Amino acid sequence: MIEITGLSFVYNPGREDEILALNDINLAVKEGEFIVVLGRNGSGKSTLARHFNGLLLPTEGEVNVDGLSTKDPQDLWKIRQLVGMVFQNPDNQIVATVVEEDVAFGPENLGAPPVEIRKRVDEALAAVHMSEYARYEPHLLSGGQKQRVAIAGILAMKSKYLVLDEPTSQLDPRGRREVMETLRNLNVKEGATVVHITHFVEEAIYAERVIVMDKGRVALDGAPRAVLGDVERVKSLGITPPPMTILAHRLAKRGLKVPRDILDVEEMVRTLCSLS
């Protein structure tokens, strides 16, 4: 697992513009989990993401990945193979002019044999449902498809953990849905461990665990129903709960026997139909 103990991080230490971005974070990410991290701008969620694979190093505390410390320079190479990162802008992550060549870039740099690279590329593209686009030029793809190619590149490197820092922030609704369905399939069918940083609260519905960051701390941590169902608390942290959860609370206040932790439209429809 990834274990974070007493993690604090300061930008610009010792200067007038010093910022305490993370404050005494204690967190464990178990193998096979699908975690969504929410938080308003400046809450520290992206800073936290960059600690998972040593892009940032703790000012205080420890980050250990399968027992390897990000503070140990000798461990960083292995850690960055274990923890793959996907960022906001897919265009900044694609380096080749053909999709399959881009996915092959990582394994090639790891020195994998050509036969193994071919196998990894085919498997990775199949996992994100992009096999038919293997010979496409990336600039011909939609934003969602580009992000799926970026995810395939991480899979081809055999990364054990996928950390995604707001990968859907620049995508339209269809692209966001494509990426989220891909991540869910990877988690359920491939057993991939996913840590997804986002400001779209509806994406938390895909997760089995939701973490809400606030002022550099973990404010809430639990199952999506437990976290998002606490409407007033979530609102106080700058997060707008899912529309159906808000509706459920309003209906319950009016006396209807509706659970307050409803998350999506289908569940709301089933619930209302059962009342008739």
Image (cartoon, rainbow, N blue to C red):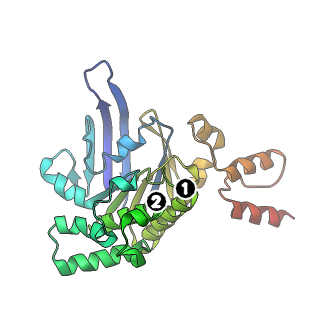
Q: Which residue is mark 2?
A: 143
Between 26 and 266, the residue placed more toward the observer is 266
* Residue at point 60%, 34% (across, down): 236
Q: Amino acid at mark 2?
A: Gly
Q: Is residue 59 above or below residue 91?
A: above
* Residue at point 74%, 49% (across, down): 247
Q: Secondary structure at mark 1?
A: loop
Using the image, tell me which numbered label, if any, was put on residue 172.
1
Q: Amino acid at mark 1?
A: Asp
Q: Position of residue 48 (x, y in %)?
A: 36, 43
Q: Position of residue 181 (x, y in %)?
A: 51, 66
Are the residues at dot 2 and dot 1 in contact (C-beta closer than 8 Å)?
A: yes
Q: Secondary structure at mark 2?
A: helix
Q: Is residue 271 left or right of residue 154?
A: right
Q: Quadrant of the C terminus?
A: bottom right
* Residue at point 32%, 56% (across, down): 93
Q: Is residue 82 above or below residue 254?
A: below
